Amino acid sequence: MSERPISPRQLWWLAAGFTVWCSALVSLYGIHGIGCAFAWSTGSLRLSLAATLLAHLLVLGWMWRATGRAGLDSGFGETQAFLQWVVLGTLITSLVATVLTFGPALLLATCI
């Protein structure tokens, strides 16, 4: 076997995109709950939610770009190529899931 084993640290990238999605979920619901509990104005609550969503989308976009630009190390062979393909797929999927899950929520009534 001429390929080197892949470091376990690289496997964390498989969960990185959906970890950011989970962070967006917790942050947005937390900000929404705090804003409603303390009677923030609708404009400031929407701005806070939009800024938080944008920050998470920027992090996901940066991760996608950084992972996509990383060159394949030929020492890892086909396993590394497959791992990079799967990591890029999960990052793209988490970016789309973040937009589809949390984007429309900004259009709803903020507090009932």
Image (cartoon, rainbow, N blue to C red):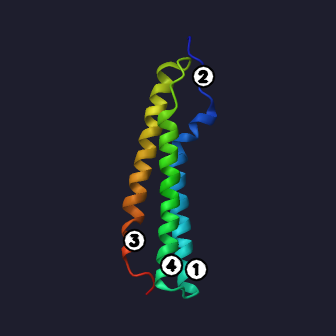
Tag 4: residue type?
A: Leu
Residue type indicated by callout 2: Pro
Relative to 112, residue 82 above or below: above
Residue 52's label in the rendered image is none
Number of numbered discs visible in the structure rendering: 4
Q: CA distance from mark 3 to mark 2?
A: 43 Å
Between residues 50 and 87, which one lies in front from this camera angle? 50
Q: Position of residue 7 (x, y in %)?
A: 63, 29
Query: Which is more toward the observer, 57 or 24?
Result: 57
Give the number of the disc on residue 34. 1
Name, please, the residue furthest toward the top: 2
Q: Report crowding for label 3: few under 14, some 14 to 19, many 20 or more residues within 10 A (C-alpha).
A: some
Single out the mark in the foreground, 1 or 4: 4
Precedes in sequence: disc 1 or disc 2: 2
Query: CB of mark 3 within 8 Å of CB of mark 2?
Result: no
Q: Secondary structure at mark 1?
A: helix
Q: Nearer the viewer, mark 3 or mark 4?
A: 4
